[in-house]
Image (cartoon, rainbow, N blue to C red):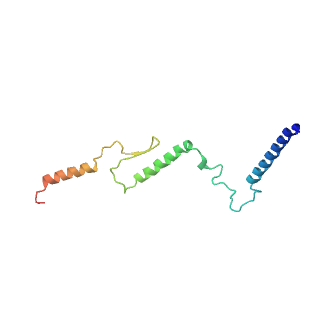
């Protein structure tokens, strides 16, 4: 009788593990795949698209186009003559316009105007 105890325990262990494994497999299997009408088979961006090019490859062209756009806005006659524009992108100058010119700031101009007005105008004004 002792000879049969160890093989019976091993057989019971094998049967228990097989039963538990098959239950776990059947619980995790959702069944057969069914095609849904809402699934789209097309990708959002085509594989050979310009939008997929890396940033380092398209950056020079994009910077040139941005610089040209800024220059066309600055060339508009409605823009003020005295202006200072400097556009940088990742440490690269994209557009510059009158960067080296010195401009008088607005508060300084108001201070000079107020000082000259107090000197020129009388106290009654």
**Image side of residue 57 versus residue 79, left or right:** right
Write the residue at 34% across / 41% down: 100
Q: Position of residue 65 (x, y in %)?
A: 50, 48
Q: Position of residue 107 (x, y in %)?
A: 26, 50
Q: Nearer the viewer, residue 63 or 88?
A: 88
Q: Quadrant of residue 79?
A: bottom left
Q: Nearer the viewer, residue 76 or 85?
A: 85
**On-image quarter of the C terminus:** bottom left
Total marks in image: 0
Write the residue at 59% across / 46% down: 53
Q: Position of residue 50 (x, y in %)?
A: 60, 49
**Image side of residue 17 versus residue 85, left or right:** right
Q: Position of residue 10 (x, y in %)?
A: 83, 40
Write the residue at 24% across / 48% down: 108
**On-image quarter of the N terminus:** top right
**Image side of residue 25 versus residue 62, left or right:** right
Q: Quadrant of residue 42?
A: bottom right
**Image side of residue 75 versus residue 3, left or right:** left
């Amino acid at each position: 009788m002792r000879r049969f105890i160890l093989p019976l325990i091993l057989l019971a262990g094998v049967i228990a593990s097989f039963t538990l494994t098959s239950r776990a497999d059947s619980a995790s299997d959702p069944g057969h795949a069914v095609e849904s009408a809402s699934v789209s088979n097309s990708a959002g961006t085509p594989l050979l698209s310009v939008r997929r090019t890396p940033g380092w490859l398209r950056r020079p062209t994009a910077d040139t186009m941005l610089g040209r756009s800024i220059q066309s806005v600055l060339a508009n006659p409605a823009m003020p003559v005295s202006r200072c524009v400097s556009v940088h992108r990742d440490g690269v100058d994209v557009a510059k316009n009158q960067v080296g010119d010195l401009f008088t700031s607005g508060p300084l101009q108001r201070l000079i105007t107020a000082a000259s007005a107090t000197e020129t105008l009388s106290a009654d004004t």
